[in-house]
Amino acid sequence: MRIGALEAGGTKMVCAVGREDGSILEQISIPTTTPAETIPKIIEYFKDKEIEALGVAAFGPVDVNPQSETYGYILDTPKIPWRQANLLGELKKALPVPMGLDTDVNGSCLGEMTYGCAKGLDSVIYLTIGTGIGVGVGINGRPVHGMLHPEGGHILLTRHEDDPEGGICPYHKNCFEGFACGPSIEARWGKKAVELKDRKEVWEMESFYIAQALVDYIMILSPRKIILGGGVMHQEQLFPLIREKVKEMIGGYLNTKELADMDSYIVPASLHDDQGIMGCIKLGLDALNQS
Ligand code: ADP
Ligand code: ZN
């Protein structure tokens, strides 16, 4: 079986063909410029690939409600040319196969729930901390949507006492993304995040923000596992700092076997950066099964 997978990101579109077991047969990457330029290139790639379905995980906000008139549209994104772009509709016009759609982070969460370290778990959180912060939520093997989809990067947090500036989110002065995304680290410390590796105070503050967010998710969703991906999480020294602070901030209020084993509870993504594209394969498979 050949399933198409499209990881539609703000900087690049990863197009792949995979199989049911999550294996990837072939893959290319196309720069994300404008819909008029980029969408035809995606169609060109998939046109003769003999795929039976296509799964799409897209940057957002994106309308993931199949009942909505704007299902499959990119909504009010900061990437201006993509505002109100009918991504899924354009693909459907050109490629006559069942299609599944979700957000990029829900896609990665689904990838980990299907093929990775969160297999079989009934409640899972997947975060990406990069240019922005996105949070995917999976309950009983399915990504959560609700009225739109979770936007866990914009939860409001308490500012660190040594952080004079506040966050950089144009919508919220004190949100997680504004405090802790890659560009925020760079604005605060005046250097590329990757060049700040040896500055202890940078990662102390970063882990303070990430831990606060995780504690909020833990209290609300009671996840069995929390998976952290994205460029910033390449700073591996963050993991022990985050685990320690989460424990501290929970303050002894919860005592579960999962929390007792922090090294298995708060973990890096397990699929070598293929969790997103593998999630797309699963979205395609599900669409095929429902068709
Ligand atoms: P995107 O979010 O655009 O898909 P990334 O997840 O790579 O892409 O996130 C890019 C952000 O992550 C940038 O702000 C960059 O500075 C930061 N970043 C990328 N690699 C590293 C690294 N090794 N260490 C720390 N920060 C990084
Ligand atoms: Zn915000």
Image (cartoon, rainbow, N blue to C red):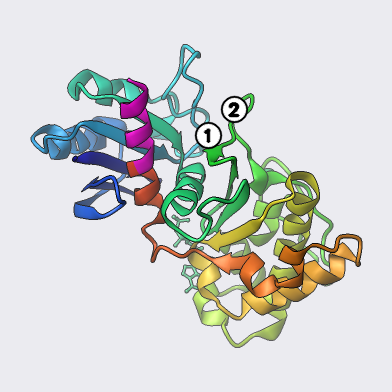
- Tell me, yes or no, if residue 273 can be seen here: yes
Q: Is residue 173 above or below residue 88?
A: below
- The picture quadrant where one finds residue 2 is top left
Q: Is residue 143 above or below residue 289?
A: below
- Which residue is under mark 2? 148
Please tell me which residue lies in front, 42 or 140.
140
- Label 2, label 1: how far apart the Cα atoms are: 8 Å
What span is in magenta? 282-291
**Residues at marks 2 and 1 touching, judged by CB atoms closer than 8 Å:** yes
Provide residue 170's location: percent of width, then percent of height.
Answer: 66, 44
Q: Amino acid at mark 2?
A: Leu
Q: Secondary structure at mark 2?
A: loop
Please tell me which residue lies in front, 54 or 134.
54
Query: Residue at 29% across / 42% down in the picture?
Result: 5
Q: Quadrant of the N terminus?
A: top left
Ligand 2 shows up in the quarter that is top right
Q: Is mark 2 within 8 Å of ligand 2?
A: no
Query: Residue at 58% across / 67% down in the picture?
Result: 267
Q: Is mark 1 within 8 Å of ligand 2?
A: no
- Which residue is under mark 1? 61
Residue at the far left: name it. 48
Q: Quadrant of the C terminus?
A: top left
Q: Amino acid at mark 1?
A: Pro
Asked whether, in this view, residue 267 is left or right of residue 107, the answer is right
Asked whether, in this view, residue 132 is left or right of residue 288, the answer is right
Provide residue 71's location: percent of width, then percent of height.
Answer: 45, 20
Residue 194 shown in magenta? no
Sequence order check: which comes first, mark 2 or mark 1?
A: 1
Provide residue 217's location: percent of width, then percent of height.
Answer: 73, 50
Query: Residue at 63% across / 74% down in the picture?
Result: 239
Asked whether, in this view, residue 192 is left or right of residue 86, the answer is right
Predominant SS of the magenta segment:
helix
